[in-house]
Amino acid sequence: MKQESNILHFEGLYGDDFGKYSSEYIFLELIATRSQNFDWNIKPHIHAQLFQIFMVQKGSLLFQESTQKQELKAPCIILIPPTKLHGLVYTPNVEGYILTLSESIIEDIFKTSNTIWKTFEEIHLLTNTEEEEFDKIQRTLNNIEAELFGENPERSLMLRAYLTQLFISLHRLTNQEEAQKGDSMMMVHFRKFQQMIKKSAYPKSIPEFADELNITPVHLNRICRTIAGKSAIELIHQNIIIEAQKYLLHTSYSVSEIAYLLKFEYPNYFAKLFKKHTGLTPLEFRQQDRR
């Protein structure tokens, strides 16, 4: 173990001051086996060359990544590549497994697939895993355990096969959850944009809306087209038309007054936009309703 700037570094497992690195290192243990010896508090630390997979089946934990902390509840999977600072504080009722293996094993398995290997270069917290997928990964882990602690012929080949299956499943699951998070964030941006349209004083440009959302105008348009099938400016115009229709139906304001209330500099531009979207001039729309 090394300690630099108050950060713990381990060649082997946490708390093993005499652990030595091996390019073929694989170890599987229950979370409770080691954690309970440290009062369920695993301080922030780094493994220089070891990759870890935490399968949390029961209980909860506080996960620390660099300066961020996050509460996690079972079932969840945590993927931690080498050199990534991490700490964990478990509840005493936690159940699950930790698979630790040499980075070189994963590199060797996926040496012809950079796409898969790149998935495991960052920490991933898989918290929305379907029960069926979680059980599938758990079964693969059980197979690894049987081979790891058994004396079957061709043990190393079978281990390699199960590890390949495990990491491909985790690769797919990681991409799936990342896509779901992306979709969720897309909807958050879209709803905020809708609220901003209703509250904002016109005229306001698309770049200004995008800047307030902390995204690019291109991304804002992509979000709008994906969710609503319309561009950002089309949604803005749609809201203007809805507001204009309310004024035309429920007030006696003139077309020019309504254009002014909707922040149009020129009434004729408002009338032109209204007809483009409704097929009627503002006056025709008002008269049609009164027939």
Image (spheres, rainbow, N blue to C red):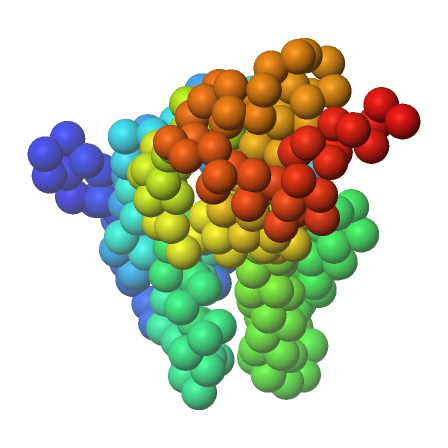
Residue positioned 43% across, 71% down in the render:
117
The answer to whether 170 appears left or right of 265 in the picture is right
Whole-percent x, y for residue 228 in the image: 65, 48
How many numbered markers are drawn?
0
Whole-percent x, y for residue 144 in the image: 64, 64
- Quarter of the picture holding the N terminus: top left
Q: As rendered, which of 173 and 60 lies closer to the eye? A: 173
- The reply to whether residue 37 is in sight is no
Q: As rendered, which of 42 and 189 lies closer to the eye? A: 189
Whole-percent x, y for residue 184 in the image: 59, 41
Which residue sits furthest left?
5
Residue 86 image-quadrant placement = top left
Which residue sits furthest top?
251
- The reply to whether residue 173 is in sight is yes
Q: As rendered, which of 24 and 283 lies closer to the eye? A: 283
Q: As rendered, which of 165 and 230 lies closer to the eye? A: 230
Residue positioned 73% across, 36% down in the render:
284
Relative to 55, is 120 above or below?
A: below
Whole-percent x, y for residue 283 in the image: 68, 32
Residue positioned 44% across, 87% down in the render:
112
Relative to 138, is 209 above or below?
A: above
- Quarter of the picture holding the C terminus: top right
Relative to 175, is 75 above or below?
A: above
Residue positioned 29% across, 42% down in the render:
85
The answer to whether 84 appears left or right of 107 in the picture is left
